[in-house]
Amino acid sequence: MQKHFKFFLFVFVLISTVNTANAQLTDLARVEYSYIPKNNSEDSFDRFRFLLNYPIKMSEDAYLLIGGEYSRITLNLEDSYPFPTSNLRRLHILDFNLGYTFKMSENWRFGAKITPRLASTLRHKISGDDIFLNGGVYAINDRTKDKTASKPYRLVLGLTYNTTTGIPLPLPFVSYFRRVNEKWSYNLGVPKTNVKYYINENNIIQTFVGIDGYFANTQERFSIDGKEADSVSLSLILAGIGYEYCFTDHLVWYAYTGYTLSMSNRLRDENREDVFKLDNVNTFYLRTGFKFKI
């Protein structure tokens, strides 16, 4: 079981990074709020996330993208735990984004990004343990607006790198989207698979299965049963329904609600080994926000 969980955690961190990379290459601005209560407890988790990217046109089909993303995570740990919980109440994740994209051919576009990340409680002076490095390269075949395509689609092939996985190699990523007709579309891949129904072009309903979570350095070590924890992570697999309202082609309000299929909130040591389980009880999930996209 331990080997299976380590593999799941590794995949989770990888695809979470890919999710962030996708958003950083397509979203120019985003404000989002997420909330997860804990069943049979006063504990809860909420996250406020803000992203802003600024595209700089380098040539007719090439853009440099500069920006950042900030997440403030609040862990309301009201239950009794064998360690002080005040240090974990606030987690801060700050990404600095530098991306570049250009058209390789009529149908294919290349994108690359590098993201230094600060992920920490920020209760003390910043150290090297608070800094992580993420990045990726992507080839995108986007024919979603091609009038000659009978069934418009978008294919993304890429390689990603994330220092928190502990694997010093680039890892593959594949995502496939197809607009079946005026009313239906689907997306296959990670971190999200969905089926959308278009009431009209402004109102969209979807069902989805996705992944969410975080990883951060605690800055202070916790000694629990002879083991020392220095990082905290949350990994979620969830399913639910969502609604999107498109004010324009670029400005969207969205809301997702559902239930976690798998939930793992853990303290871990410097070798990414489990030290203490904060929570693994499935529960309700809510996420809503606005985004301005390319």
Image: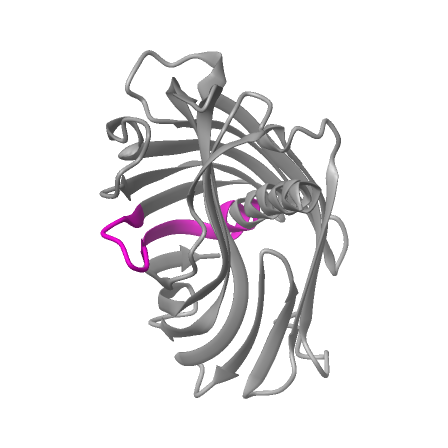
Asked whether, in this view, residue 133 is left or right of residue 52, the answer is right
Instruction: Tell me, yes or no, whether the highlighted magenta stretch contains residue 43.
Output: yes
Taking the spot 67% from the left edge, 46% from the top edge, the residue there is 1
Colour basis: one colour
Q: Is residue 118 above or below residue 46?
A: above
Nearest the viewer among 1 and 71 is 1
Nearest the viewer among 123 and 41 is 41
Asked whether, in this view, residue 179 is left or right of residue 228, the answer is right
Q: Is residue 275 above or below residue 55?
A: above
Asked whether, in this view, residue 46 is left or right of residue 208, the answer is left
Nearest the viewer among 30 and 106 is 30
Number of numbered discs present?
0
Instruction: Tell me, yes or no, whether the highlighted magenta stretch contains residue 65.
Output: no
> Which stretch did the figure color magenta?
21-47
Taking the spot 69% from the left edge, 46% from the top edge, the residue there is 4
Taking the spot 66% from the left edge, 79% from the top edge, the residue there is 147
The location of residue 117, given as percent across then percent down, is 48, 28
The location of residue 124, given as percent across then percent down, is 30, 14
Nearest the viewer among 210 and 40 is 40
Taking the spot 65% from the left edge, 83% from the top edge, the residue there is 180
